[in-house]
Image: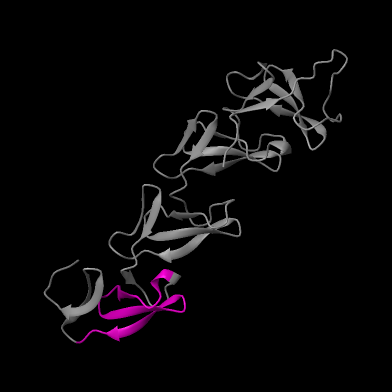
Amino acid sequence: MSRLVWILGLSCLSVACKPEVGSSCDKGESRCLDPSTQLICSEGKMIAAPCRGQKGCWVEGGVRCDISGNQPGDVCSKDDEGAATCAGDQRGQLVCLNGAYVLEPCRGPAGCKLSGERAQCDKSVMQSGDSCRDPGLKACNAVGTQLLECKDGKMATSLNCRGSSGCQSAGGKLDCDLSVAAADDPCPDAMKDKNACSADRLSILVCKDGKFKVDESCAKGKLCRSKGGGIRCEKDDGKTE
């Protein structure tokens, strides 16, 4: 997750010590190059990194850099991998990755908020194709019809949530309604040998080998319904679920 909103550094206390861009340094070493620029160590070499927040670069118990106004593409120390702050519109966070700030969306209802010195990004809602750094991270898509999972650095569809409740996030827990499915839709191990209704309600599907397959076709005049946690074909009473 995120690290410090204010990146702390170690001041060079010796009068004779005046590091410059490109000079050798120790991890954590830094000083203010000017009121809005920090000279900071990155993998053993000094680099100039912007401090675009209102406080700029200042010294207070060490060198501090206000990155609250920084932009995607701005330089950051590779030693500060993962340092982050909320973007100006609070709908994303700026994260230091591989020596530059990258904008990560926070599409969940809570957006991005600062909690003390940490940025908290609500990733309960994402889009297929969004970049991700946490393998196995799960989220609902924006319209609540799919459960997404982080695979190979991108969010990809894991499950289709075709039931009336769709995909929802409540209390930090994601729920995907699999009471309705289509043949060949993926299904989780927890659904093995369990049933779902087809979208047209004309058949019952069963989860086998990680996919839903047609298990039973409903007789004429009957429709597949989900009641009391069970899936069965019942007489068509003209009511919709």
Quadrant containing the C terminus in the rendered view: bottom left
Q: Position of residue 60 (x, y in %)?
A: 65, 15
Q: Is residue 192 highlighted in magenta?
A: yes
Quick one: quadrant of the N terminus?
top right
Please state if 194 lies on the left or on the right of 75 as rendered: left
Which residue is farthest left? 237
Residue nearest the viewer, comparing 153 with 200 = 153
Span of residues in magenta:
190-219
Q: Residue at x 88, y 14 (%)?
A: 16
Task: From the top left corner, tell me how far across and down residue 175 is, in percent.
Answer: 37, 58
Q: How is the image coloured?
A: one colour
From the top left corner, tell me how far across and down residue 239 is, in percent. Answer: 13, 69
* Residue 163 place in picture, x, y as percent: 30, 65
Using the rendered view, name the quadrant where residue 219 is placed.
bottom left
Query: Residue at position x 51%, y 28% from top?
Result: 116
When the figure is inspected, residue 26 is found, relative to residue 153, above or below; the finding is above
Magenta span contains residue 187: no
Point 70% across, 43% down: residue: 98
Dividing the picture into quadrants, the one containing residue 188 is bottom left
39 or 25: nearer the viewer: 25
* In the rendered image, the vertical position of residue 53 relative to residue 173, given as above or below: above
Q: Farthest residue toward the right?
A: 16
Q: Is residue 80 above or below residue 134?
A: above
Q: Is residue 24 left or right of residue 209?
A: right
